Image (cartoon, rainbow, N blue to C red):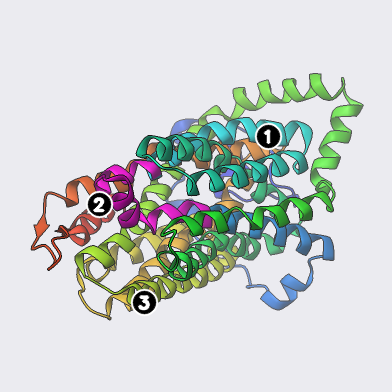
Amino acid sequence: MASANEKTGRHLDGDFMDHDDNKMTVKEYLSTRISTLKPPMKRPPNPIKVLGSLSKMNWMMFLLAFLGWTWDAFDFFTVSLTVTDLAEEFGKSKADITWGITLVLMLRSVGSIVFGLAADRYGRKWPWVINNLLFIIFELATGFCNTYEQFLGVRACFGIAMGGLYGNAAATALEDVPPEARGIISGMLQQGYAFGYLLAVVFARALVNTTSHGWRPLFWFGACPPVLLIIGRLFLPETEAYQRRMAMRQDGDGIEKTFFREGKVALKRYWLMLIYLVLLMSGFNFMSHGSQDLYPTMLQNQLQFSANKVTVTQVIANLGAITGGTVVGYCSEVFGRRLSILTMCILGAALIYPYGFLKDERIAAAAFFEQFAVQGAWGVVPIHLMELSPAGFRTFVVGTSYQLGNLVSSASSTIEATIGERFPLPPTASGVKRYVYGKVIAIFMACVF
């Protein structure tokens, strides 16, 4: 089931995946799950020195991947932050609008398969360019939707485009960095997600309901930065790891034959690992979407926070997420990937009550530490997935396992919104219905952790 090098998810030669033939049985694998949690307790590398070991090209690749992942998250959270406005615009309930979130998550797996295979076969560059062109088209289209059906259709298409970016970004950022830098770079890369959420919060406050166009300018604005991401990628080469892989394929039976032969071998040898990664990512996505997607609605609807208070609370939460992901990603080099993830899950579970039940400004502190834990665990994910993926299909495996996990967890916000409407509160003076979303989020997260 797993080689000796896989037992801890770490590898000995500086590359990500170089499995030997010493396969473990399922029984042997399960019997080592506790013992291999023992931290390697290596002397922690100086983070400044580690970051200094990256070349200029490493930094440029990382920056591009970080910004791409940031804007992926920005575009996703534009709907989460405008649920109330969209419900009013289309004459639907908030639960109906969350289907716009669910459809994106469900169809991202399609994009991850298509663009993942394309990136592993034809290179990282052109799938990235096509991805971002589609971002531009579908973000603009969302801003011009006039009916609920148009909104759902455009967001479904957007989900396919969005699904192709994560695996490509992880491979672009991490493939060529020195082994000792992978933990901290992984944590920094993953926080593009939190940074994108933070930017979405800020620009939602600046652009939503500040003009006669209501919520639409947020989506129109979201279509602009991908132009810069396309230009930036066109000026950068393929990663060195991909170029080496292509040279090996060329020296074999030719690129096409070698690619398909590698695919057959990868599917035969690592199918069980892929199932494990999908299940792992399902849990992770339940954790992030369950704690984040409906939270702005809870603050606005249940707690009656003003737009400014919602913005401040969400900014504080995302600062916690950025801090947690970076710190825990770095610490995973010392304590191990799995132990770091489990520790953050325990911390997140301990913070569920204040995160869902505080009713005043103190909830911002709970949000900071809850998202520190959630994104702290997530900070380990990019490098953990890369280390467990076969080299020839790294983009496909990382992206597809992540997005299939999204598919499994896609109904998180819809489930929370639908159940939340069973716990009504007194309506506002203007007659707006209110619900106890915090209780449902807390129960949902308790089940996930």
Q: Residues within 10 Å of mark 3 (few under 14, many from 20)?
A: few
Q: Is residue 183 visible?
A: yes
Residue 202 within the magenta-colored segment of the rendering:
no
Q: Which residue is mark 2?
A: 444
Q: Residues within 10 Å of mark 1 (few under 14, many from 20)?
A: many
Residue 273 at x, y percent in the picture: 53, 34
Q: Quadrant location of the C terminus?
A: bottom left
Q: Which residue is mark 1?
A: 393
Q: Quadrant location of the N terminus?
A: top right
Q: Which residue is mark 3?
A: 308
Residue 163 at x, y percent in the picture: 55, 40
Q: Quadrant of residue 306?
A: bottom left
The amino acid type of the residue labelled 1 equals: Phe
Which residues are the magenta region?
Answer: 73-100
**Point 40% across, 65% down: residue:** 209
Residue 387 at x, y percent in the picture: 63, 47
Q: Could you tell me which secondary element the residue under label 3 belongs to?
A: helix
Q: Quadrant of residue 191?
A: bottom right
Mark 2 or mark 3: which is in front? 3
Residue 303 at x, y percent in the picture: 21, 70
Mark 2 or mark 1: which is in front? 2
Q: Is residue 94 above or below residue 307?
A: above
The amino acid type of the residue labelled 2 equals: Phe
Q: Answer left or right for 327 relative to 168.
A: left
Residue 81 within the magenta-colored segment of the rendering:
yes
Q: Answer left or right for 269 relative to 315.
A: right
